[in-house]
Image: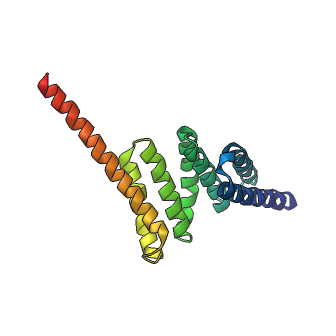
Amino acid sequence: PEEGRNSASKADTLDLLVEILWKRDQGRSEEIRLLAERSVALRRAEGRPDDYKLGTSLRDLATLHLVVGGYAEAKKHFQAAQDILEKHQDKRPLEFAEFQNNLGGLYLNLKDLLPARACFEGALRLRRAHLPPTDPRLAGTLNNLGSLVREIAEASDTSSLRAARLDEA
């Protein structure tokens, strides 16, 4: 039990460092990613696969990969986090909304537009239910939905152009 508390305490410290460093200096993303990976490893070693803090550590690691363009790694960690965080969404709806918003950003970057839409709409529903209408997190999710609409329009325009070129041939 003492070793488990030590491991959890170290992971909590690493999570705090990741948060502070990320807010201060995103240019150190490689170092921050290594700290986040260590936190995940410590939490996994605790042997509690459904632990909320493991889910948030995985989410943070996924977000770090997303920001630097490591989409395959981001997707892997987001999927692992989703399995855990969904079990806790009733108790922590705003944190789950943040998770959905970040996962939607991954899908948007991958041009996987239907899952992106589902994530952004889920995040917006939760945020509208739990935040005042002037909260900037609502605007962030609405902005992401706007980016999604732009992607859909561009994909539609590209398909129309291809069809028009085929008709001309």
Q: Closer to the camera, 63 or 42? A: 63
Quadrant occupied by the N terminus: bottom right
Horizontal relation, residue 105 to residue 156: left or right: right
- The residue sitting at the left extreme is 168
Residue located at (28% from left, 47% from top): 153
Q: Closer to the camera, 114 or 52? A: 114
Q: Position of residue 82 (x, y in %)?
A: 54, 54
- The residue sitting at the top extreme is 169
The colour scheme of the drawn protein is: rainbow
- The residue sitting at the right extreme is 2
Residue located at (52% from left, 61% from top): 98
Taking 108 as reference, is 121 above or below it? below
Q: Position of residue 61 (x, y in %)?
A: 63, 49
Residue located at (65% from left, 58% from top): 23
Q: Where is residue 106 in the image (x, y as percent from the top left)?
A: 48, 47
Tell me the quarter of the picture where residue 128 sits: bottom left
Q: Is residue 122 visible?
A: no
Tell me the quarter of the picture where residue 56 sits: bottom right
Horizontal relation, residue 6 to residue 88: left or right: right
Q: Closer to the camera, 112 or 2? A: 112
- The residue sitting at the bottom extreme is 132
Horizontal relation, residue 111 to residue 8: left or right: left
The total number of labels drawn is 0
Q: Where is residue 2 in the image (x, y as percent from the top left)?
A: 87, 61
Quadrant occupied by the C terminus: top left
Q: Can residue 97 be seen in this view?
A: yes
